[in-house]
Amino acid sequence: MESQDNKFNYKIILAALVAVVIGVLIAFYYSYAQSQSQINFLEQEKAILVKDLTIMKADVDRLSALNEINEIELQDSKDKVQQLLDSVGRLNFTVERLREFKTELRRLESKNDSLKLKNNFLRYNNSLLTDKYEQMRKEAELLRASSTTLAEAEALQRRKILELNQKLKNKSYLKLQFPEAASFRLRGSRPIETNKASTVEKIRGCFTIMPDPSETRAEKVLYLQFLNPDKQVIEDNANTITVNGNVYSKRVEVLYRGEQMDVCDFITIPEESLEEGMYTLNVFEDERLLASSEFQLK
């Protein structure tokens, strides 16, 4: 009978270990998928940014060409004005010619003013484009930095997965036997064992740690979990212990030297807080269930 119980307990332990490994792999796979999605999004943003910068460069080239045309027209106007000055200097013109020259001069002045306005407008646009280009360049650098950071985070996650897998392979757990729980009422300060639910003020959990020659001296942390008939965790003095989302009744620290060791500890509860029914004691180490037993209160 004891051999069958041991086989059953081993199967439970093996199933729990497989479930933990699968859960960890699923969690890290989900984190990896999120990182990959963010990297794809950044790549798309980078492509859009490169396209916008290409369009901006084309606009800058077009405005530069227009600016060169305006400068050529401005130089042509200067040459015509110089020709008029030369003609005036030689006095080889008539009053009608002078009027024509004045009209031409006014036209050239008007065209020159227009060219100045166009040139100022082009300079203003060039300034805006330069600022926008600089802003886009900075954003591109930030995107590249973010992409690098995500790649580093992804590499770190892969390393953590490998480290966790290695840790799970190398982790050795205590072997427990004879888990049992007992309930007590208090007469003064002296505990008296009872199985009457309404009088219970303390519940004791005990178990035996089996010898392990490979262990010499190590501090072990175990957790007692007392469950009521509704499978809810019973609090110790209105307090519970939460580790990685798992709730326990009490934390027990032991100094294990590789020898057989009996361990007992109590939790304290208000009198008349328990109901009749079947209760459960579970003993955990690092979220792994090592032993379990049931006891009944009437």
Image (cartoon, helix red, strand yellow):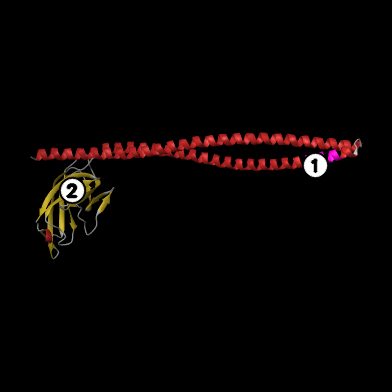
The x, y position of residue 256, in whole percent, is 21, 46
The residue under the point 61% across, 43% down is 128
> Which marked residue is nearer to the observer: mark 2 or mark 1?
1
In this rendering, does residue 291 appear at all?
Answer: yes
Q: Which residue is mark 2?
A: 282
Front residue of this view, candidates 174 and 249: 249
The x, y position of residue 153, in whole percent, is 40, 39
| Magenta part, dominant SS | helix
The residue under the point 75% across, 37% down is 74
Q: Residues within 10 Å of mark 2 (few under 14, many from 20)?
A: many
The Cα atoms of the two marked residues, 2 and 1, are separated by 103 Å
Residue 235's disc number:
none
Residue 106's disc number:
1
Magenta stretch? 99-109
Rendering quarter of residue 53: top right
Assign the N terminus to one quadrant of the image: top left
The residue under the point 84% across, 38% down is 100
Left or right: residue 239 compared with residue 162: left
Rendering quarter of residue 21: top left
SS for dot 1: helix
The residue under the point 56% across, 34% down is 54
